[in-house]
Image (cartoon, grey):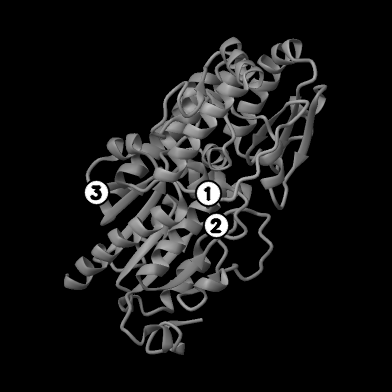
Amino acid sequence: MSLNDGTLRGGAPNANDLPHILLISDDRAWPMTSGYRRRIAQQVRALAQVGTVYWIVAPRGRRDDGETPTVPAELSGRVVAVLVPAPTRSRASRVTRWTTGDLPRSVAAGDWGSVLAHLSRLDLAAFDFVFCVGLASFEHVKGTIRCDQFTVVDMVDLESTKLEQASDIRTQGIVGRVRSGLNRSEVRRWRRLEKSVAAEATATILSSDSETDTIGGNARCVPNTYDDPAPIRRRISSPPNILFVGSLDYPPNADGLDWFVCGIWPTLRARIPELSMRVVGEGLSTQHSARRCAGIEVIGPVADLRPLLEEATLCVVPLRWAGGTRVKILEAFAHELPVVSTTVGAAGLDVSDDCELRVADDPEGFASACAEIIEDPHLAERIAEAGRQAFESKHETNHVVLQSAEWLSLLVDQARET
């Protein structure tokens, strides 16, 4: 679909001369099967409140189904989505591009030729501004969109921070030291890319204040969100069970689960023998330690997580390295489910230990925090209520989307004046 077919130019949606926005993302938004997709959906909703959106969806992965991107019915009059994949290059091409260039591996791996060809057929001057989700989106299209185009980039989180944490952890043995060295090389590449995008874009967005402060300049914090699940139907689970949620082909999640299963779970089971655990999310390796532990059920991906959240006693977020903020924590907060997290897992959220959640960074302390919540219903209720209040005040989708739309509207006014 092009700008000349009446849908985005001169047609019914633009009868009031609404702003025209070009959105480019490196993944779908719906179904919202990951925190990243939820982030994209959040931005689509905000942009649709500002004007009409022509959305190029360029999936990064190799498992994309090839179907036209889903857009909720309530957005269909404002959002037109087209699928233009950016598939992963061959292994030889990826190695060559990485060794001869300065882009991070995942950014260099994508073949954005089809996206650039699609952009060349659009009247880019018809758009009031361009909005990119993901650094790869902006990095690959910046030479095609007009150099003076008003551009907003949602960086989501700082990959350099995440990999720097991983480099400090994965240092055991020869393989660990080699991996740590490669990570440090990637940290330098990501840091260069993050700084260059911040300098080239009109405005950048991140999901936490701490990372916004790191980038500085034109960076703005737009927090991650979650849809309000009210009414909440919490059921007391007997015997108690722990819930771990996350995409397990995402290395920080797989590492965190392994750390919990090997270093924390045995202590917890010894203290509370009837305790069980459910692991929810796609991509868990067949060799992962969670598959071999008594009391742990690996469920895999589910279409509706709500029943499991309602039945859980506790949600754990045992991450040792990560970036941005964890939607899984917001998800638990929204359902009034108490959370135990590491400092890294809770990073970027305006929360504190023993208030909205419990925080521990060593196996013994983490196990103790979990046991105390399981054994003390009053403590669990107090923490769950504080988490719910934090969700309502700062992370409820409609509230944040409205704030984002107001800010984006101001940017449109600026773009139209220039």
**Residue at 57%, 32% in the rendered image:** 252
Q: Which kind of residue does numbered mark 2 sit on?
A: Asp
Task: Please report the residue visible at 62 percent of the width from the left and 58 percent of the height from the top.
Answer: 31
Instruction: Find the distance from the CA under tag 3 to the CA under tag 2.
Output: 25 Å
Q: CA distance from mark 1 to mark 3?
A: 22 Å
Residue situated in front as seen by the camera: 71 or 335: 335
| 10 Å crowding of disc 2: few (<14), some (14-19), many (20+) | many
Q: Within 10 angstroms of label 3, few (less than 14), some, or many (20 or more) residues?
A: some
Q: Nearer the viewer, residue 320 or 407?
A: 407
Query: Dot 1, crowdedness within 10 Å: few (<14), some or many (≥20)?
Result: some
| Labels 1, 2: front one | 1
Say which amino acid is labelled 1: Tyr
Disc 3 marks a residue whose amino acid type is Asn
> Dividing the image into 4 quarters, which one contains the C terminus?
bottom left
Q: Which residue carries the number 2 mark?
A: 27
Q: Tell me, yes or no, whether the two marked residues, 1 and 3, touch with CB atoms within 8 Å.
A: no
Residue 408 location, quadrant: bottom left
Q: Is residue 44 visible?
A: yes
Q: Residue at x 46, y 49 (%)?
A: 396
Look at mark 1 in the image and give the residue it sits on: 36
Percent position (x, y) of residue 139? 39, 54
Q: Looking at this view, is 346 or 40 the one in front?
A: 346
Report if the CB atoms under discs 1 and 2 are less than 8 Å apart.
Answer: yes
Q: CA distance from mark 1 to mark 2?
A: 8 Å
Instruction: Report the residue marked by disc 3.
Output: 218
Q: Secondary structure at mark 1?
A: helix
Q: List x then y, in percent, for residue 67.
A: 66, 69
Image side of residue 73 versus residue 217, left or right:
right
Q: Which secondary structure lies at badge 3?
A: loop
SS category of the residue bearing label 2: loop
Q: Is residue 77 above or below residue 91?
A: below
